[in-house]
Image (cartoon, grey):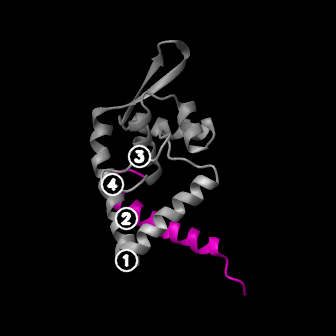
Amino acid sequence: MKAYSMHYLLHAADLLEDRLRRRLAEADIQPRQARVLDALDRMEPASQIALARAFDVTPASMSTMTARLLDRKLITRETHPEAARSNLLRLTARGRDLLAEIHAAWTDMDRLIETELGADKAASLAELTRQLRDSLGGRAPGADEESPLPNGTPR
């Protein structure tokens, strides 16, 4: 039976996301919510449409996500000053404070990968997956260029 490379990548991603979900549960935040808060930190103020485009999801999906973040008072919504039918989203102080915990959780996941693979292989994996993402048309939401996380690793 043929082994498909993408199966290993997807399975590893699922396993890492499960560990990240458990780690972020300490902060009562889901991995995708954490990514939206991080993106909003770089993009703010941003519309739901801009966030939806950045994450390549439907506006309805982003609306559901932002509604949850609004309910938790992690973001605010205000009317766009130049377009009354559009809203702008911003992080609240509570949302901004949560970023430190989010980044710490991501650093923990980077350390886990480095522990499991070794520093050189972990760095190679990060570079290869970034190249794959970029070649498939992906980008870090809110970043025209790669900007490093607080620990210096690319987003």
Q: Do the numbered discs 1 and 4 sit on residues whose CB atoms are within 8 Å?
A: no
Question: Which residue is identified by label 1?
Answer: 118
Pointer 3 residue: 147
Residue 124: give x, y in percent of width and height.
Answer: 46, 69
Q: Residue at x 58, y 75 (%)?
A: 8
Q: Which numbered dot is residue 152?
A: 4
Q: Could you classify mark 1 by the number of other residues whose Cα lies within 10 Å: few (under 14), some (14-19), or many (20 or more)?
A: few
| Residue drawn where x is 33% and y is 68% of the image | 111
Q: Secondary structure at mark 1?
A: loop
Residue type at numbered disc 1: Gly
Q: Would residue 137 appear left or right of 146 to someone viewing this image?
A: right
Q: CA distance from mark 1 to mark 4?
A: 17 Å
Q: Is residue 11 magenta?
A: yes
Residue most toward the right? 1
Identify the residue at horizontal 62%, vertical 55% (top origin): 135
Element on which disc 3 rests: loop
Q: Estimate the x, y position of residue 133 in percent, counting from the top left.
A: 58, 56
State the residue position of label 2. Answer: 109
Judged by depth in the image, the label closer to the viewer, 2 or 3, is: 3
Q: Earlier in the sequence, mark 2 or mark 1?
A: 2
In the rendered image, residue 152, in percent from the top left (x then y), is placed at: 33, 54
Residue 87 located within the stretch drawn in magenta: no
Look at the image and tell me whether residue 70 can be seen: yes
